[in-house]
């Protein structure tokens, strides 16, 4: 089993502590979402894991050893940290051939990963002519080149079109199903909710959560019922009598935070309120994440004041 083990990790940059005593384990067979506000320490942790930065204290090991010690690192870890890292003057094929040669990977593997990433037809084009989405695909192809047991990807959907996002989603789920260790750092809550089995959440360099996705949503999310009625005033009266509140949820629908569909259905039936729809709404990862990290976001924006609004 090839795990990523982070133990008592600390990284200081002069007076700023980017990572503060972080301990966690990323396990195989799962897609692990790596979340946190800007400045939470995610990128620093990934760079240390890949030997690009040195920790002030603590360690990160992959498969029980430091990444720097791997004789052929692409056969251990496939990483995508920066889609712009490929030399713009090289073709996509030559970029991958150089990587393959440096790690003792057969040349035939280059054609395989180019096809898997959907780049076979542009393999002889220079990387400098690629769009951001094409560069992302090339970065994923490079990560797959050594057929590694561990994948570490930082914002891999950046620049991808809808087809590309679906492709990447299915790819990562498939790699985890094969028993590989997949760590994905992202700010896209909706996409993380679709692919991640487990979450590691940082805030101000410290661990805020290390838990399965379902447990995270239960612990930090708010269940709610969603419904539609032809008589909203009677609905509000029935909900208010039970200490509940209905909020508009778009297209004539109403959301009732903190209540299940079963409870709301019982209340409105007793009050004789007609219903056109009634269902439990899934807990939002975005809502749960924002609730957990509310006090750990150093760059949170403030709303416009009434004075600012009056100037328009």
Image (cartoon, grey):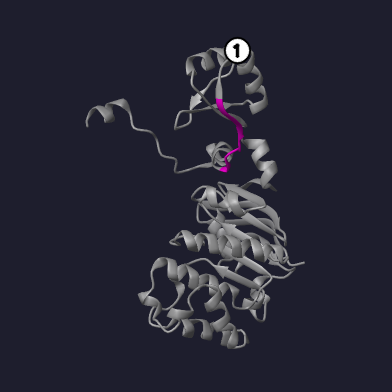
111 lies above or below 261: below
| Residue 268 rendering spot, x and y as whole percentages | 60, 17
Looking at the image, can residue 52 be seen? no
Q: Quadrant of residue 224?
A: top right
Q: Is residue 312 left or right of residue 274?
A: left
Magenta range is: 276-285
139 lies above or below 255: below
Residue position for label 1: 271
Q: How many marks?
A: 1
Residue furthest to the right in view is: 1
The dominant secondary structure in magenta is strand
| Residue 89 rendering spot, x and y as whole percentages | 38, 82
149 lies above or below 208: below
| Residue 108 rendering spot, x and y as whole percentages | 59, 87
| Residue 269 rendering spot, x and y as whole percentages | 63, 17
Q: Is residue 28 left or right of residue 77?
A: right
Residue count near mark 1 (Cα–Cα under 10 Å), binned few <14, some 14–19, many ≥20: some
Q: Quadrant of residue 275?
A: top right
Q: Quadrant of residue 150?
A: bottom right
Residue 136 on the magenta span: no
What is the quadrant of the C terminus in the image?
top left
Viewer-nearest residue: 275 or 264: 275
Q: Residue at x 48, y 21 (%)?
A: 230
Q: Residue at x 66, y 77 (%)?
A: 75
Report helix, strand or loop for mark 1.
Answer: helix
Residue 279 on the magenta span: yes
């Amino acid at each position: 089993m090839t795990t990523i083990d982070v133990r008592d990790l600390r990284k200081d940059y002069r007076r700023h502590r980017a990572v503060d005593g972080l301990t966690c384990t990323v396990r195989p067979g799962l897609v692990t979402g790596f979340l946190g506000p800007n400045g939470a320490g995610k990128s620093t942790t990934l760079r240390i894991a890949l030997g690009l930065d040195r920790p002030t204290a603590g360690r990160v090991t992959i498969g029980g050893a430091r990444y720097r010690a791997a004789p052929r690192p692409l056969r251990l870890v496939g990483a995508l940290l920066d889609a712009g890292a490929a030399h713009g003057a090289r073709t996509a094929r030559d970029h991958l051939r150089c990587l393959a040669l440096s790690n003792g990977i057969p040349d035939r593997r280059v054609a395989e990963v180019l096809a898997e990433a959907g780049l076979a037809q542009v393999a002889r084009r220079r990387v400098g002519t690629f769009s951001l989405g094409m560069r992302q695909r090339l970065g994923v192809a490079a990560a797959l080149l050594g057929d590694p047991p561990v994948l570490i990807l930082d914002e891999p959907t950046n620049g991808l079109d809808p087809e590309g996002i679906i492709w990447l989603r299915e790819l990562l789920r498939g790699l985890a199903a094969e028993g590989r260790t997949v760590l994905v750092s992202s700010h896209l809550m909706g996409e993380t909710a679709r692919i991640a089995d487990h979450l590691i959440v940082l805030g101000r360099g410290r661990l805020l959560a290390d838990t399965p996705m379902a447990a995270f949503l239960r612990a930090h999310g708010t269940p709610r019922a969603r419904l539609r009625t032809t008589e909203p005033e009677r609905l509000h009266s029935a909900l208010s009598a039970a200490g509940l509140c209905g909020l508009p949820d778009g297209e004539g629908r109403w959301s009732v935070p903190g209540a299940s569909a079963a409870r709301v259905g019982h209340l409105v039936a007793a009050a004789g309120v007609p219903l056109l729809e009634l269902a439990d709404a899934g807990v939002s990862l975005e809502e749960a994440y924002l609730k957990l990290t509310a006090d750990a976001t150093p760059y949170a924006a403030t709303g416009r004041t009434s004075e600012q609004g009056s100037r328009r």
